[in-house]
Amino acid sequence: MLGESSHCEIRRGLPADATALSEVFRASWSNAYLGIIPHLHLDSMIRRRTPDWWGTTIRSGGELLVLQVSDIVAGYATMGAARTRGTYEGEIYELYVSPTYQGIGFGERLFEACRYHLDGRQLCGLIVWALADNATASDFYWRRGGRPVGMAFERFGRTKLKKIAFAWD
Ligand SMILES: CC(C)(COP(=O)(O)OP(=O)(O)OC[C@H]1O[C@@H](n2cnc3c(N)ncnc32)[C@H](O)[C@@H]1OP(=O)(O)O)[C@@H](O)C(=O)NCCC(=O)NCCS
């Protein structure tokens, strides 16, 4: 149970976080995308994110922030230069909080830490992509001041899902 004494820290990911991140990924992606991304695809995306995958990503210098609540890894975010060249130089690639820890302010703190990190890299402007069906994410970015600036489609087998780009100047 989370209480006033729960200590929250946002820090760089370490190789020792690999197993916990694999579990956070499984829990948060299943919860966010069940019924949106076809099960077969979601399942294979989750199976690919093994502790080894996370360990390699961390050791190769991937920009990864970890949300730690007391001694539990409760979320993560990855970020860096925007994948598409344009007006917005910084991008949050992934921002996920474990279901148990959602809705109590941790996502906001992780988001602010990402912005701080990207500012430190002098990347101006921010873009984040979210699936249109993921209303929680769209609402979250809208309430943080992000506005839709583009859209695209991503295919999962025969299913085509719409993605929305939210941006901040
Ligand atoms: C989207 C996501 C990252 C948001 O994280 P979160 O921890 O649930 O969000 P927060 O709790 O910080 O913010 C949600 C609301 O709770 C409010 N809140 C509730 N209790 C709070 C508390 N004790 N302290 C501060 N804020 C609190 C926040 O103010 C915020 O309200 P607002 O958006 O109207 O300002 C998270 O829900 C998630 O991981 N979802 C699934 C994955 C996902 O969709 N990721 C994005 C993919 S692009």
Image (cartoon, helix red, strand yellow):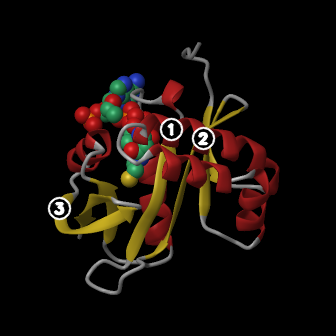
Residue at numbered disc 1: 30
- Whether tag 1 and tag 2 are in contact, CB under 8 A, the answer is yes
Compared to residue 27, the image places residue 93 above or below, namely below
Compared to residue 24, the image places residue 76 above or below, namely below
Answer left or right for 155 relative to 40: left
Residue at numbered disc 2: 26
Q: Tell me the residue at 69%/55% (across/down).
A: 13
Answer left or right for 141 relative to 155: left
- Element at label 1: helix
Estimate the x, y position of residue 90 in percent, counting from the top left.
40, 73
* Mark nearer the viewer, 3 or 1: 1
Q: What residue type is disc 3 on?
A: Pro
- Whether tag 3 and tag 1 are in contact, CB under 8 A, the answer is no
Ligand 1, by image quadrant, is: top left
The N terminus - image quarter: top right
Estimate the x, y position of residue 100 in percent, counting from the top left.
52, 24
